[in-house]
Image: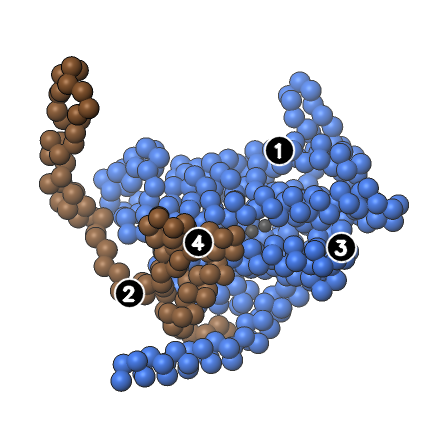
């Protein structure tokens, strides 16, 4: 009934305003990258939600594995000395 | 709501969790209880995945089929402004379908599969879209009542435990308010218009009131998926709770329009602080859901025709992409 194969999936990233990062908003199917941008315009920016669009083939994204996230992020967990709040500075010392 | 068909048992039963790893299940439930969001690559019980695929895809199908009853009036909207508004609203509904298909696909089902389920008639969509739009006032009644009921249901879904669904719902809810207000605005103009226009508005309310109440799905006592969905924080309120809220919000709005809600049993219960309403005709609801509503066949035929008529465009785009891809690679 429907077509047997989907067009490739593109993940869509949008910059809402100048000065902001592109942020993931969702995905669209499209025959090619040009069409992905056009679809993303229609699907995700009908109310001026963006001034710039990135479309990335979903298969081109490498993601970390949530099952491995403990091992991946653990090394940062006990390094609280990386945060400014770790250091006790006497009140008398100003602008530090 | 847009997912009333969840009561229908298709595919594997929801109780398949017994076979899955107990410890993982406990950890999963603990994350849900702590209001953490579940993301696509996280481990999840198969029953959770299947429930979500069915709920999100039924919701998506409802948005897509929901374009038809209103689309029917685009060429006959009474002014250029009303036409522009209606086109924008119908386009939004198409967008809602796209956000939701996209969210469903993160659970491992393909878009082609979902579309195929809709076009072959295997998938369910909301019963409300199987009623005809007979007059311009129906476009007002749909925005006011149908989108109003949808908002009632969709706001709690913004906090659903599954991240991609919750994010799609936030996007949708931002757009729904416009839908409801433009509908009420149409009703207001008619209610303040000529006697004939007031009759049109009343006639639309008469026909859309009960089907709108049915949108919230079967009564809690007959709803078999609620307990699971509540525990998994897919659903936060029961069908009857949301229906009650809708009645309490809507009755004063009808009063303001000077229209009568077509329910002789409707009354304000001061002690309970809520409206009491009459018995819903669940036989009609079940008939519509089973495919025997006034427009079920017409809606599916229209979707199929649109899909077939668009085939050459999809094929041409694929051919164009293949040609340019080959040229770029050369
Ligand atoms: Fe919608
Ligand atoms: Fe809507």
Labels 4 and 3 share a subunit:
no
Residue B135's quadrant in the figure? bottom right
Which chain did the renderer colour blue?
Answer: B
Say which of marks 1 and 2 sits in front.
Answer: 2
Alpha carbons under labels 1 and 3: distance apart: 28 Å
Q: What is the secondary structure assignment of the residue under circle 1? A: helix
Location of residue A48 with respect to B152 vertically, above or below? below
Q: What is the secondary structure assignment of the residue under circle 4? A: loop
Say which of marks 4 and 3 sits in front.
Answer: 4
Query: Going from the N terminus, do you reach mark 1 or mark 3 first?
Result: 3
For chain A, give the colour. Answer: brown
Q: Residue at x 69, y 20 (%)?
A: B270
Assess disc 1: are there few (<14), some (14-19) or many (≥20) residues with their C-alpha within 10 Å of its C-alpha.
some
Indicate the position of residue B44 as horizontal and vertical percent values.
Answer: 31, 47
Number of the label disc, if any, that sits on residue B136:
3
Q: Chain of mark 4?
A: A
Query: Going from the N terminus, do you reach mark 4 or mark 2 first?
Result: 4
Assess disc 4: are there few (<14), some (14-19) or many (≥20) residues with their C-alpha within 10 Å of its C-alpha.
some
Rendering colour mode:
by chain
Say which of marks 4 and 2 sits in front.
Answer: 4
* In the image: residue A94, left or right of residue B141: left
Residue position marked by numbered label 4 in the rendering: A50
Residue position marked by numbered label 2 in the rendering: A59
Q: What is the secondary structure assignment of the residue under circle 3? A: helix
Alpha carbons under labels 1 and 2: distance apart: 46 Å
Residue position marked by numbered label 1 in the rendering: B244
């Amino acid at each position: 009934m429907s077509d047997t194969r989907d067009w490739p999936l593109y993940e869509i990233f949008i910059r809402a305003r100048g000065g902001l990062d592109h942020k993931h908003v969702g995905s669209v199917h499209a025959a090619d990258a040009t069409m992905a941008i056009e679809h993303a315009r229609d699907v995700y920016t009908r109310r001026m939600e963006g001034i710039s669009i990135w479309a990335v083939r979903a298969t081109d994204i490498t993601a970390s594995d949530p099952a491995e996230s403990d091992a991946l992020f653990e090394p940062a967990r006990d390094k609280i000395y990386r945060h400014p709040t770790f250091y006790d500075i006497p009140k008398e010392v100003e602008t530090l | 709501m847009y997912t009333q068909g969840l009561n229908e048992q298709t595919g594997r039963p929801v109780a398949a969790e017994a076979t899955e790893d107990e410890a993982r299940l406990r950890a999963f439930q603990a994350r849900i209880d702590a209001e953490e969001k579940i993301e696509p690559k996280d481990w999840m019980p198969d029953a959770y995945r299947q429930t979500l695929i069915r709920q999100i895809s039924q919701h998506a199908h409802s948005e897509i089929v929901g374009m038809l009853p209103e689309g029917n009036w685009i060429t006959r909207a009474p002014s250029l402004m009303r036409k522009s508004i209606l086109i924008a609203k119908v386009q939004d509904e198409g967008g809602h379908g796209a956000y939701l298909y996209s969210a469903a696909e993160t659970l491992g089902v393909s878009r082609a599969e979902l579309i195929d389920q809709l076009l072959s008639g295997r998938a369910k969509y909301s019963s409300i879209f199987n009623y005809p739009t007979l007059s311009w006032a129906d476009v007002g009644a749909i925005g006011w009542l149908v989108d109003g009921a949808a908002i009632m249901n969709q706001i709690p879904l913004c906090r659903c435990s599954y991240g991609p669904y919750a994010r799609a719902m936030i996007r949708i809810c931002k757009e729904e308010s416009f839908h409801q207000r433009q509908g009420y605005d149409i009703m207001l103009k008619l209610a303040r218009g000529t006697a004939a226009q007031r009759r049109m508005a009343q006639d639309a309310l008469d026909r859309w009131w009960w089907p709108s109440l049915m949108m919230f799905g079967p009564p809690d006592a007959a709803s078999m998926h609620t307990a699971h969905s509540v525990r998994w924080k897919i659903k936060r309120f029961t069908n009857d709770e949301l229906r009650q809220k809708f009645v309490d919000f809507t009755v004063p709005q009808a009063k303001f329009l000077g229209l009568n809600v077509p329910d002789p049993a409707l009354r304000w219960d001061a002690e309970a602080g809520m409206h009491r309403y009459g018995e819903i005709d669940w036989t009609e609801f079940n008939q519509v859901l089973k495919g025997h509503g006034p427009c079920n066949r017409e809606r599916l035929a229209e979707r199929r025709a649109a899909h077939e008529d668009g085939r050459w465009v999809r094929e041409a785009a694929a051919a164009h992409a293949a040609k340019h891809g080959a040229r770029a690679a050369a």
